[in-house]
Image (cartoon, helix red, strand yellow):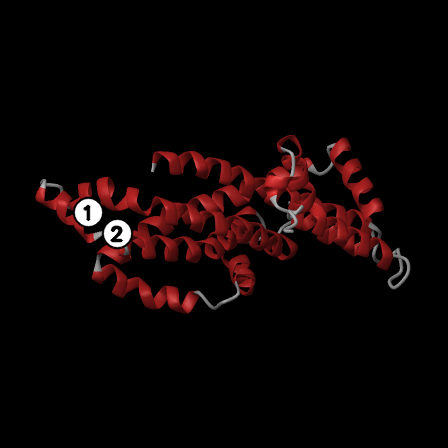
Amino acid sequence: MAHADLTAPETIPEPLQGAVAFVVRWIPLLVLAAGWELVSGWMVPEAVLPGPIAVFAETADLVASGEVFADLFLSVFRVAVGLGASILIGVALGIGMARSEPVENVFDVFLSLLYPIPKTALVPLAILWLGVGTSTAVLIVFLACLLPIVLNSYNAASDVDRNLIWSAQMMGTDGRRLLWKVVFPATIPEIMTGVRQAIPIAFIALVSAELIASNAGIGHLILAAGQIGNYTQMFAAIVVVSATAYAAVRGFEVLESRVMVWA
């Protein structure tokens, strides 16, 4: 006699399916927190590796006091400017390279040389050019996010259905109108994928830049707390930036789902 699979979604009452999915999604994080709590104070001194309870309590204090918001808002602003610039330039460059051989010939070597360079290696040079502060952080975020967006835009524009383009041309659509009316709408799904991939990269690049080249921002807060030995606050700041990046990705996914309905 066959037995029903109790783990299959259809065997779970519908009102409980959402709760079960939520628990399953967060089980890895709970396991990580439990392991962290065991390691803290046992294998590693608690002064160096505070436990998750202490860290989350400090995170709540930072948020409740508002102490973290000035740095967080500055960091989010830097991410928004750097990522926004990379979207505007990356999409135009990717589509231009896909649709124009001269454009591809000009920029292909440059992008190929830029791609393997760790963007944090450019921070000292950016400091020489722009000084310490927002401009350097924005530049590093821009450079880090540019390649994923260019590559996704390029691949999407290269794969546009030729029949779609020919049909539009036969109806008198050409030049800029062809790019705007046909090619660009067809590339939107891949562009959105590139932007979604770039969001966490933007936060990684931001914190790396702020650790070296900023006197404010969440990365600077992490560095300052570590330098004075306040490791609980250091980890709390890391939790804040991680939660912010997660919220940014999830928020973009909601926006993406609405845009994809239109596309």
Is residue 178 visible to us here? Answer: yes
- As measured in the structure, the alpha-carbon distance from the residue carrying label 2 to the one carrying label 1 is 8 Å
Q: Amino acid at mark 2?
A: Val
Which residue in the protein does label 2 denote? 160
Q: Position of residue 234 (x, y in %)?
A: 76, 50
Q: Residue at x 53, y 65 (%)?
A: 118
Q: How many marks?
A: 2
Q: From the image, which quarter does the C terminus lie in?
A: top left
Say which residue appears at 61% left-offset and 46% top-offset: 8
Residue 92: image x %, image y %? 31, 49
Hey, what amino acid is under mark 1? Leu
Say above or below: 130 vs 64.
below
Q: What residue would you read off at disc 1?
A: 164
**Residue 55: image x %, image y %?**
80, 46
Q: Residue at the spot x=54%, y=53% of the render?
A: 201
For mark 2, give the secondary structure.
loop
**Apparent side of residue 198 relative to residue 98 in the rendered image (left or right):** right
Front-most of 189 and 44?
Answer: 189
Which of these two is toward me, 51 or 128? 51
Residue 241 in the image, given as x and y percentages of width and height: 65, 45
Density class for disc 1 (Cα within 10 Å; few <14, some 14-19, many ≥20) is: few
Q: Is residue 216 visible?
A: no
Label 2–label 1 contact, CB within 8 A: yes
